[in-house]
Image (cartoon, rainbow, N blue to C red):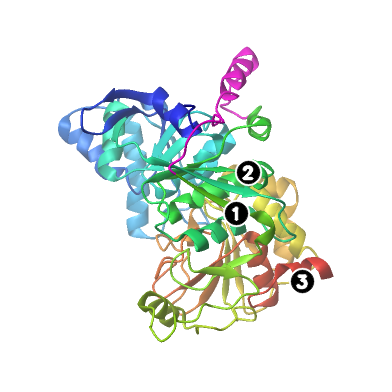
Amino acid sequence: MGKTLFDKVWDRHVVEVIPDGPQVVYIDTHFIHEVTSPQAFAGLRKRGIGVFRPKQTVATADHNVPTIDQHLPIRDALSRHQVDTLIKNCEAFGVELYGLGHPYQGIVHVIGPELGITQPGMTIVCGDSHTSTHGAFGNIAFGIGTSEVEQVLATQCILQTKPKKMKIEVNGSLRSGVLSKDIILHIISKISTSGCTGHFVEFAGSAIRSLSMEARMTICNMSIEMGARGGMIAPDETTFEYMKGRTFAPKGAEWDRKVAEWRELFTDDDAVFDKVHTFNAGEIEPMITYGTNPAMGIGITQRIPEMEGNKEDTTLKKALKYMDLSAGAPLLGQRIDYVFIGSCTNSRIEDLRLVADLVKGRKKADHVTALIIPGSRQVEEQAKSEGLDKVLESAGFELRQPGCSACLGMNEDKVPDGKYCVSTSNRNFEGRQGPGARTMLASPLTAAAAALNGYISDVRELMTNG
Protein backbone atom coordinates (compact mmCIF):
# COMPACT_ATOMS: atom_id res chain seq x y z
CA MET A 1 0.00 0.00 0.00
CA GLY A 2 1.26 3.47 -0.92
CA LYS A 3 1.71 6.38 1.44
CA THR A 4 -0.10 9.66 1.67
CA LEU A 5 1.82 12.94 1.70
CA PHE A 6 1.06 13.17 5.41
CA ASP A 7 2.48 9.68 6.06
CA LYS A 8 5.70 10.47 4.19
CA VAL A 9 6.40 13.62 6.20
CA TRP A 10 5.24 12.19 9.54
CA ASP A 11 7.19 8.94 9.28
CA ARG A 12 10.44 10.78 8.53
CA HIS A 13 10.11 12.73 11.77
CA VAL A 14 9.20 9.98 14.24
CA VAL A 15 12.00 9.63 16.80
CA GLU A 16 10.38 6.99 18.97
CA VAL A 17 7.08 5.13 19.22
CA ILE A 18 5.84 4.67 22.77
CA PRO A 19 4.01 1.33 23.14
CA ASP A 20 0.26 1.93 23.53
CA GLY A 21 0.97 5.65 23.66
CA PRO A 22 1.91 8.70 21.58
CA GLN A 23 4.91 9.11 19.29
CA VAL A 24 7.91 11.35 19.79
CA VAL A 25 8.03 13.62 16.72
CA TYR A 26 11.01 15.79 15.80
CA ILE A 27 10.20 19.44 14.98
CA ASP A 28 12.18 21.20 12.25
CA THR A 29 11.06 24.76 12.95
CA HIS A 30 9.42 26.30 16.00
CA PHE A 31 7.83 29.75 15.66
CA ILE A 32 7.07 31.71 18.82
CA HIS A 33 5.43 35.05 19.63
CA GLU A 34 4.66 37.13 22.69
CA VAL A 35 1.38 35.50 23.77
CA THR A 36 2.10 31.81 24.40
CA SER A 37 5.86 31.87 25.05
CA PRO A 38 6.26 33.65 28.45
CA GLN A 39 5.05 30.72 30.54
CA ALA A 40 7.18 28.31 28.50
CA PHE A 41 10.35 30.33 29.09
CA ALA A 42 9.43 30.60 32.78
CA GLY A 43 9.23 26.81 32.89
CA LEU A 44 12.71 26.49 31.40
CA ARG A 45 14.08 28.88 34.02
CA LYS A 46 12.42 26.92 36.80
CA ARG A 47 14.04 23.72 35.56
CA GLY A 48 17.39 25.40 34.99
CA ILE A 49 17.65 24.44 31.30
CA GLY A 50 18.08 26.35 28.05
CA VAL A 51 16.55 26.15 24.58
CA PHE A 52 17.85 22.89 23.07
CA ARG A 53 18.23 24.16 19.49
CA PRO A 54 17.79 27.95 19.45
CA LYS A 55 18.72 28.19 15.75
CA GLN A 56 15.52 26.29 14.93
CA THR A 57 13.35 28.71 16.88
CA VAL A 58 12.14 31.94 15.26
CA ALA A 59 10.38 34.69 17.22
CA THR A 60 8.36 37.73 16.22
CA ALA A 61 5.93 40.14 17.86
CA ASP A 62 2.48 40.22 16.24
CA HIS A 63 -0.61 39.72 18.44
CA ASN A 64 -0.21 42.64 20.84
CA VAL A 65 1.52 45.17 18.62
CA PRO A 66 -0.14 48.45 17.60
CA THR A 67 -0.55 49.14 13.88
CA ILE A 68 0.21 52.84 14.08
CA ASP A 69 3.26 54.61 15.52
CA GLN A 70 5.21 51.41 16.04
CA HIS A 71 8.31 53.49 16.72
CA LEU A 72 6.74 54.72 19.97
CA PRO A 73 6.32 52.76 23.22
CA ILE A 74 3.21 50.56 23.21
CA ARG A 75 0.45 52.40 25.06
CA ASP A 76 -1.51 49.43 26.37
CA ALA A 77 0.26 48.26 29.56
CA LEU A 78 -0.47 44.52 29.16
CA SER A 79 0.53 44.50 25.49
CA ARG A 80 3.72 46.41 26.25
CA HIS A 81 4.57 43.97 29.05
CA GLN A 82 4.08 40.93 26.81
CA VAL A 83 6.25 42.34 24.00
CA ASP A 84 8.95 43.45 26.45
CA THR A 85 8.93 39.98 28.02
CA LEU A 86 9.45 38.38 24.61
CA ILE A 87 12.45 40.65 23.98
CA LYS A 88 14.02 39.74 27.33
CA ASN A 89 13.39 36.01 26.91
CA CYS A 90 14.86 35.90 23.41
CA GLU A 91 17.96 37.76 24.59
CA ALA A 92 18.38 35.44 27.58
CA PHE A 93 17.92 32.20 25.64
CA GLY A 94 19.67 33.13 22.37
CA VAL A 95 16.58 33.06 20.13
CA GLU A 96 16.41 35.17 16.96
CA LEU A 97 13.72 37.85 17.35
CA TYR A 98 12.13 39.87 14.58
CA GLY A 99 10.65 42.52 16.85
CA LEU A 100 9.10 45.90 16.17
CA GLY A 101 11.33 47.91 13.87
CA HIS A 102 13.04 44.84 12.40
CA PRO A 103 12.67 44.55 8.60
CA TYR A 104 11.44 40.95 8.99
CA GLN A 105 8.79 41.68 11.65
CA GLY A 106 5.24 40.62 10.97
CA ILE A 107 2.55 38.03 11.61
CA VAL A 108 4.30 34.76 12.40
CA HIS A 109 2.49 32.81 9.66
CA VAL A 110 3.27 35.44 7.04
CA ILE A 111 6.98 35.94 7.69
CA GLY A 112 7.87 32.22 7.67
CA PRO A 113 6.84 31.62 4.05
CA GLU A 114 7.94 34.99 2.68
CA LEU A 115 11.43 34.64 4.18
CA GLY A 116 11.88 31.08 2.95
CA ILE A 117 12.08 29.72 6.50
CA THR A 118 9.05 27.57 5.68
CA GLN A 119 10.14 24.81 3.30
CA PRO A 120 8.44 21.64 2.02
CA GLY A 121 8.52 18.43 4.02
CA MET A 122 9.00 20.08 7.40
CA THR A 123 7.34 19.66 10.73
CA ILE A 124 6.45 23.12 12.05
CA VAL A 125 4.76 24.13 15.31
CA CYS A 126 3.82 27.36 17.04
CA GLY A 127 1.74 28.29 20.05
CA ASP A 128 -0.93 29.54 17.68
CA SER A 129 -3.83 27.60 16.19
CA HIS A 130 -3.34 28.88 12.64
CA THR A 131 0.11 27.36 12.27
CA SER A 132 -1.66 25.11 9.74
CA THR A 133 -0.98 27.94 7.24
CA HIS A 134 2.50 26.50 6.61
CA GLY A 135 0.92 23.26 5.39
CA ALA A 136 0.46 24.95 2.01
CA PHE A 137 4.08 23.98 1.32
CA GLY A 138 3.56 20.28 1.99
CA ASN A 139 4.38 20.51 5.68
CA ILE A 140 2.89 19.00 8.81
CA ALA A 141 2.24 22.25 10.65
CA PHE A 142 -0.03 22.65 13.66
CA GLY A 143 -0.69 24.77 16.70
CA ILE A 144 0.39 23.70 20.18
CA GLY A 145 -0.38 24.71 23.76
CA THR A 146 1.90 26.54 26.17
CA SER A 147 3.15 23.37 27.90
CA GLU A 148 4.00 21.94 24.48
CA VAL A 149 5.85 25.15 23.56
CA GLU A 150 8.06 24.49 26.58
CA GLN A 151 8.45 20.86 25.52
CA VAL A 152 9.69 21.84 22.05
CA LEU A 153 11.98 24.57 23.39
CA ALA A 154 13.55 22.03 25.75
CA THR A 155 13.83 19.02 23.43
CA GLN A 156 13.03 20.04 19.80
CA CYS A 157 10.50 17.20 19.94
CA ILE A 158 6.87 16.81 20.84
CA LEU A 159 4.64 13.96 21.99
CA GLN A 160 1.80 13.42 19.51
CA THR A 161 -0.78 10.80 18.66
CA LYS A 162 -0.84 10.27 14.91
CA PRO A 163 -4.10 11.65 13.54
CA LYS A 164 -6.33 10.06 10.91
CA LYS A 165 -6.06 11.18 7.29
CA MET A 166 -8.66 12.98 5.20
CA LYS A 167 -8.58 14.18 1.61
CA ILE A 168 -10.65 17.13 0.45
CA GLU A 169 -10.67 17.36 -3.32
CA VAL A 170 -11.85 20.48 -5.17
CA ASN A 171 -12.08 20.13 -8.94
CA GLY A 172 -13.15 22.43 -11.75
CA SER A 173 -12.78 26.13 -12.46
CA LEU A 174 -13.63 28.98 -10.11
CA ARG A 175 -16.20 31.53 -11.18
CA SER A 176 -15.51 35.25 -11.41
CA GLY A 177 -15.11 36.95 -8.04
CA VAL A 178 -14.49 33.69 -6.19
CA LEU A 179 -11.24 33.41 -4.24
CA SER A 180 -9.60 30.75 -2.08
CA LYS A 181 -11.27 32.26 0.99
CA ASP A 182 -14.62 31.47 -0.61
CA ILE A 183 -13.49 27.89 -1.27
CA ILE A 184 -12.60 27.23 2.35
CA LEU A 185 -15.67 29.01 3.75
CA HIS A 186 -17.83 26.94 1.41
CA ILE A 187 -16.16 23.72 2.54
CA ILE A 188 -16.52 24.61 6.23
CA SER A 189 -20.20 25.46 5.73
CA LYS A 190 -20.76 21.96 4.33
CA ILE A 191 -18.50 19.94 6.66
CA SER A 192 -19.14 21.91 9.91
CA THR A 193 -16.69 23.09 12.55
CA SER A 194 -16.24 19.52 13.84
CA GLY A 195 -16.35 17.55 10.60
CA CYS A 196 -12.58 16.99 10.46
CA THR A 197 -11.94 16.37 14.15
CA GLY A 198 -9.13 13.88 14.67
CA HIS A 199 -7.92 14.20 11.08
CA PHE A 200 -5.11 15.87 9.18
CA VAL A 201 -6.43 17.10 5.82
CA GLU A 202 -4.75 17.05 2.42
CA PHE A 203 -6.33 19.46 -0.06
CA ALA A 204 -6.13 18.25 -3.65
CA GLY A 205 -7.82 18.52 -7.04
CA SER A 206 -7.49 20.72 -10.11
CA ALA A 207 -8.96 23.82 -8.44
CA ILE A 208 -6.43 23.59 -5.58
CA ARG A 209 -3.52 23.05 -7.96
CA SER A 210 -4.52 26.17 -9.92
CA LEU A 211 -4.13 28.40 -6.85
CA SER A 212 -1.18 30.66 -6.05
CA MET A 213 0.85 29.98 -2.91
CA GLU A 214 -0.84 32.91 -1.14
CA ALA A 215 -4.23 31.39 -1.93
CA ARG A 216 -3.12 27.93 -0.79
CA MET A 217 -1.99 29.44 2.51
CA THR A 218 -5.48 30.85 3.01
CA ILE A 219 -6.99 27.39 2.49
CA CYS A 220 -4.62 25.66 4.93
CA ASN A 221 -4.89 28.52 7.43
CA MET A 222 -8.59 27.83 7.98
CA SER A 223 -8.41 24.03 7.91
CA ILE A 224 -8.54 23.99 11.70
CA GLU A 225 -11.89 25.80 11.62
CA MET A 226 -13.32 22.44 10.52
CA GLY A 227 -11.80 20.77 13.58
CA ALA A 228 -8.81 19.40 11.64
CA ARG A 229 -5.41 19.06 13.28
CA GLY A 230 -4.01 20.81 10.23
CA GLY A 231 -4.12 21.02 6.45
CA MET A 232 -1.55 20.49 3.73
CA ILE A 233 -1.08 20.71 -0.03
CA ALA A 234 1.54 18.81 -2.00
CA PRO A 235 4.39 21.03 -3.27
CA ASP A 236 4.73 21.55 -7.02
CA GLU A 237 6.23 23.97 -9.54
CA THR A 238 4.09 26.79 -8.11
CA THR A 239 5.67 26.13 -4.72
CA PHE A 240 9.22 26.07 -6.03
CA GLU A 241 8.75 29.23 -8.09
CA TYR A 242 7.41 31.06 -5.03
CA MET A 243 10.32 29.94 -2.83
CA LYS A 244 13.23 30.46 -5.20
CA GLY A 245 15.54 33.30 -4.15
CA ARG A 246 13.87 33.98 -0.82
CA THR A 247 16.14 35.06 2.02
CA PHE A 248 16.52 31.74 3.84
CA ALA A 249 15.69 29.38 0.97
CA PRO A 250 18.47 27.04 -0.21
CA LYS A 251 20.84 28.43 -2.84
CA GLY A 252 22.89 27.02 -5.72
CA ALA A 253 23.53 23.28 -5.73
CA GLU A 254 21.69 22.91 -2.41
CA TRP A 255 18.58 24.37 -4.05
CA ASP A 256 18.69 21.78 -6.83
CA ARG A 257 19.20 18.97 -4.32
CA LYS A 258 16.29 20.13 -2.14
CA VAL A 259 13.91 20.55 -5.08
CA ALA A 260 14.66 16.99 -6.21
CA GLU A 261 13.83 15.85 -2.67
CA TRP A 262 10.66 17.95 -2.51
CA ARG A 263 9.37 16.48 -5.78
CA GLU A 264 8.92 13.18 -3.92
CA LEU A 265 6.41 14.77 -1.55
CA PHE A 266 3.11 13.62 -2.99
CA THR A 267 0.43 11.07 -2.18
CA ASP A 268 0.93 7.73 -3.91
CA ASP A 269 -1.86 6.61 -6.24
CA ASP A 270 -2.67 3.58 -4.10
CA ALA A 271 -2.59 5.42 -0.75
CA VAL A 272 -5.71 5.19 1.38
CA PHE A 273 -7.42 7.98 3.34
CA ASP A 274 -9.75 7.44 6.26
CA LYS A 275 -12.26 9.84 4.74
CA VAL A 276 -12.64 11.69 1.41
CA HIS A 277 -14.78 14.71 0.48
CA THR A 278 -15.19 16.05 -3.07
CA PHE A 279 -16.38 19.52 -4.15
CA ASN A 280 -17.12 21.19 -7.48
CA ALA A 281 -15.39 24.57 -7.70
CA GLY A 282 -17.95 25.81 -10.24
CA GLU A 283 -20.71 25.60 -7.61
CA ILE A 284 -18.97 28.01 -5.23
CA GLU A 285 -19.95 31.68 -5.17
CA PRO A 286 -18.58 34.54 -3.03
CA MET A 287 -19.21 33.59 0.60
CA ILE A 288 -20.21 35.54 3.71
CA THR A 289 -20.86 34.38 7.28
CA TYR A 290 -23.97 35.34 9.21
CA GLY A 291 -23.38 33.72 12.61
CA THR A 292 -20.80 33.17 15.32
CA ASN A 293 -18.68 30.34 13.93
CA PRO A 294 -17.05 29.93 10.50
CA ALA A 295 -19.47 27.17 9.45
CA MET A 296 -22.36 29.64 9.57
CA GLY A 297 -21.71 30.83 6.04
CA ILE A 298 -23.76 31.20 2.86
CA GLY A 299 -23.26 32.18 -0.74
CA ILE A 300 -23.65 35.92 -1.16
CA THR A 301 -26.98 35.57 -3.01
CA GLN A 302 -28.45 33.09 -0.53
CA ARG A 303 -30.55 33.68 2.57
CA ILE A 304 -29.80 32.95 6.21
CA PRO A 305 -31.11 29.45 7.00
CA GLU A 306 -34.56 29.06 8.50
CA MET A 307 -35.10 27.32 11.81
CA GLU A 308 -35.57 23.60 11.15
CA GLY A 309 -39.32 22.97 10.99
CA ASN A 310 -41.06 23.88 14.23
CA LYS A 311 -38.02 22.96 16.28
CA GLU A 312 -35.86 25.91 17.26
CA ASP A 313 -32.18 25.46 16.55
CA THR A 314 -30.68 26.76 19.79
CA THR A 315 -27.24 27.46 18.33
CA LEU A 316 -28.63 29.34 15.33
CA LYS A 317 -31.10 31.24 17.48
CA LYS A 318 -28.36 32.34 19.87
CA ALA A 319 -26.04 33.34 17.01
CA LEU A 320 -28.70 35.39 15.20
CA LYS A 321 -29.64 37.14 18.42
CA TYR A 322 -26.00 38.15 18.95
CA MET A 323 -25.70 39.26 15.31
CA ASP A 324 -29.15 40.93 15.35
CA LEU A 325 -30.09 39.16 12.12
CA SER A 326 -33.19 37.19 11.12
CA ALA A 327 -33.55 33.62 9.88
CA GLY A 328 -34.63 33.52 6.24
CA ALA A 329 -33.38 37.04 5.51
CA PRO A 330 -30.82 37.92 2.83
CA LEU A 331 -27.48 39.46 3.76
CA LEU A 332 -27.22 41.46 0.56
CA GLY A 333 -27.88 45.08 1.45
CA GLN A 334 -27.08 44.64 5.15
CA ARG A 335 -25.43 47.87 6.34
CA ILE A 336 -21.94 47.48 7.78
CA ASP A 337 -19.69 49.78 9.82
CA TYR A 338 -16.16 48.39 9.58
CA VAL A 339 -14.06 46.48 7.08
CA PHE A 340 -10.88 44.72 8.17
CA ILE A 341 -8.55 43.34 5.52
CA GLY A 342 -5.62 41.56 7.14
CA SER A 343 -4.71 38.69 9.52
CA CYS A 344 -2.63 35.57 8.85
CA THR A 345 -5.44 34.50 6.51
CA ASN A 346 -5.50 37.40 4.03
CA SER A 347 -2.76 40.00 4.55
CA ARG A 348 -0.28 39.10 1.85
CA ILE A 349 0.73 41.20 -1.14
CA GLU A 350 -1.64 39.29 -3.44
CA ASP A 351 -4.57 40.22 -1.18
CA LEU A 352 -3.62 43.90 -1.22
CA ARG A 353 -3.22 43.86 -5.00
CA LEU A 354 -6.70 42.37 -5.46
CA VAL A 355 -8.26 45.03 -3.25
CA ALA A 356 -6.33 47.89 -4.86
CA ASP A 357 -7.38 46.73 -8.32
CA LEU A 358 -11.05 46.72 -7.29
CA VAL A 359 -11.12 50.07 -5.46
CA LYS A 360 -8.93 52.02 -7.89
CA GLY A 361 -10.76 55.17 -8.94
CA ARG A 362 -13.57 54.55 -6.43
CA LYS A 363 -14.37 55.81 -2.91
CA LYS A 364 -15.49 53.90 0.14
CA ALA A 365 -18.79 54.77 1.83
CA ASP A 366 -18.40 57.69 4.26
CA HIS A 367 -19.76 55.81 7.28
CA VAL A 368 -17.40 52.82 6.90
CA THR A 369 -14.03 52.56 8.65
CA ALA A 370 -11.81 50.49 6.35
CA LEU A 371 -8.54 49.16 7.76
CA ILE A 372 -5.94 47.36 5.69
CA ILE A 373 -3.19 45.75 7.76
CA PRO A 374 -0.26 44.19 5.87
CA GLY A 375 0.97 40.90 7.26
CA SER A 376 4.59 41.99 7.53
CA ARG A 377 7.04 44.82 7.09
CA GLN A 378 8.03 43.27 3.77
CA VAL A 379 4.41 43.28 2.54
CA GLU A 380 4.07 46.89 3.68
CA GLU A 381 7.21 47.96 1.84
CA GLN A 382 6.26 46.05 -1.30
CA ALA A 383 2.79 47.62 -1.31
CA LYS A 384 4.39 51.05 -1.15
CA SER A 385 6.93 50.28 -3.85
CA GLU A 386 4.09 49.20 -6.16
CA GLY A 387 2.04 52.31 -5.35
CA LEU A 388 -0.77 50.29 -3.79
CA ASP A 389 -0.73 52.56 -0.73
CA LYS A 390 -1.66 55.57 -2.86
CA VAL A 391 -4.50 53.69 -4.57
CA LEU A 392 -5.90 52.44 -1.27
CA GLU A 393 -5.62 55.77 0.50
CA SER A 394 -7.24 57.60 -2.42
CA ALA A 395 -10.20 55.25 -2.05
CA GLY A 396 -10.44 56.07 1.66
CA PHE A 397 -8.84 52.89 3.01
CA GLU A 398 -6.32 53.22 5.84
CA LEU A 399 -3.13 51.25 5.24
CA ARG A 400 -1.43 50.70 8.59
CA GLN A 401 1.64 48.88 9.93
CA PRO A 402 1.85 45.08 10.28
CA GLY A 403 0.36 43.00 13.07
CA CYS A 404 -2.56 40.75 13.93
CA SER A 405 -4.66 43.89 14.43
CA ALA A 406 -8.46 43.53 14.40
CA CYS A 407 -8.38 39.78 13.85
CA LEU A 408 -8.75 39.51 17.61
CA GLY A 409 -9.40 41.89 20.49
CA MET A 410 -5.88 41.67 21.91
CA ASN A 411 -4.60 45.07 20.79
CA GLU A 412 -5.89 48.57 20.12
CA ASP A 413 -7.67 47.78 16.82
CA LYS A 414 -11.02 46.67 18.23
CA VAL A 415 -14.48 46.84 16.63
CA PRO A 416 -16.96 48.68 18.91
CA ASP A 417 -19.88 46.99 20.62
CA GLY A 418 -22.79 46.29 18.25
CA LYS A 419 -20.96 47.34 15.09
CA TYR A 420 -20.79 45.13 12.01
CA CYS A 421 -17.39 44.31 10.54
CA VAL A 422 -16.72 42.44 7.30
CA SER A 423 -13.43 40.76 8.07
CA THR A 424 -10.94 38.71 6.07
CA SER A 425 -9.74 37.00 9.25
CA ASN A 426 -10.50 33.42 10.26
CA ARG A 427 -12.92 33.55 13.20
CA ASN A 428 -16.24 35.23 13.86
CA PHE A 429 -16.77 34.12 17.46
CA GLU A 430 -18.69 36.32 19.88
CA GLY A 431 -16.40 39.15 20.98
CA ARG A 432 -13.52 37.97 18.78
CA GLN A 433 -12.90 41.48 17.39
CA GLY A 434 -13.89 43.21 20.62
CA PRO A 435 -16.73 42.93 23.17
CA GLY A 436 -20.04 42.90 21.31
CA ALA A 437 -18.43 43.17 17.86
CA ARG A 438 -20.38 41.49 15.05
CA THR A 439 -18.04 39.82 12.56
CA MET A 440 -18.84 38.60 9.05
CA LEU A 441 -16.06 36.60 7.41
CA ALA A 442 -15.44 37.09 3.71
CA SER A 443 -12.76 37.28 1.02
CA PRO A 444 -10.74 40.46 0.41
CA LEU A 445 -12.84 41.21 -2.68
CA THR A 446 -16.17 40.83 -0.86
CA ALA A 447 -14.85 42.91 2.05
CA ALA A 448 -13.67 45.66 -0.30
CA ALA A 449 -17.03 45.69 -2.09
CA ALA A 450 -18.81 46.14 1.25
CA ALA A 451 -16.52 49.05 2.10
CA LEU A 452 -17.22 50.76 -1.22
CA ASN A 453 -21.01 50.43 -1.00
CA GLY A 454 -21.42 50.56 2.77
CA TYR A 455 -23.40 47.33 2.81
CA ILE A 456 -22.97 43.63 1.98
CA SER A 457 -22.60 43.42 -1.78
CA ASP A 458 -21.99 40.94 -4.56
CA VAL A 459 -18.52 41.92 -5.77
CA ARG A 460 -19.29 40.48 -9.20
CA GLU A 461 -21.57 43.43 -9.87
CA LEU A 462 -18.73 45.87 -9.20
CA MET A 463 -16.39 43.80 -11.37
CA THR A 464 -18.93 43.92 -14.20
CA ASN A 465 -19.45 47.67 -13.84
CA GLY A 466 -15.78 48.50 -13.33
Which circle's residue, 3 or 1, is located before the other in the chain?
Answer: 1
Picture coordinates of residue 62 (x, y %)? Answer: 45, 49
- State the residue in front, 76 or 55: 55
Question: Quarter of the image holding residue 30?
Answer: top left
Q: Is residue 50 left or right of residue 455?
A: left
User: What is the three-letter code of the residue carrying label 2?
Assistant: Gly
Identify the disc placed on residue 461.
3
Image quadrant holding the C terminus, namely bottom right
Name the amino acid type tagged 3: Glu
Circles 3 and 1, Cβ within 8 Å, touching? The answer is no
Quick check: marks 2 and 1 in contact, CB under 8 Å?
Answer: yes
Residue 426's disc number: none
Q: CA distance from mark 2 to mark 3?
A: 29 Å
- At x 32% / y 38%, what residue is drawn? 88
Left or right, residue 276 beside residue 214 = left
Label 2: few (<14), some (14–19) or many (≥20) C-alpha neighbours in 10 Å: some
- Nearest the viewer among 301 and 359 is 301
The secondary structure making up most of the magenta span is loop
Question: Could you tell me the amino acid type at mark 1?
Answer: Phe
Please, is residue 187 above or below residue 125 in the view? below
Magenta-drawn segment: 246-274
Q: Assign a secondary structure to mark 3.
A: helix
Q: Alpha-carbon distance for marks 2 and 1?
A: 9 Å
> x and y percent of residue 215 in the render?
62, 48
Ranked by sequence position, the earlier of labels 2 and 3 is: 2
Which is nearer the eye, 357 or 119? 119
Q: Which residue is mark 1?
A: 279
What residue sits right under mark 2 in the picture? 205
> Mark 3: few, some, or many residues within 10 Å (few <14, many ≥20)?
few
Residue 252 sits above or below residue 90 on the image: above
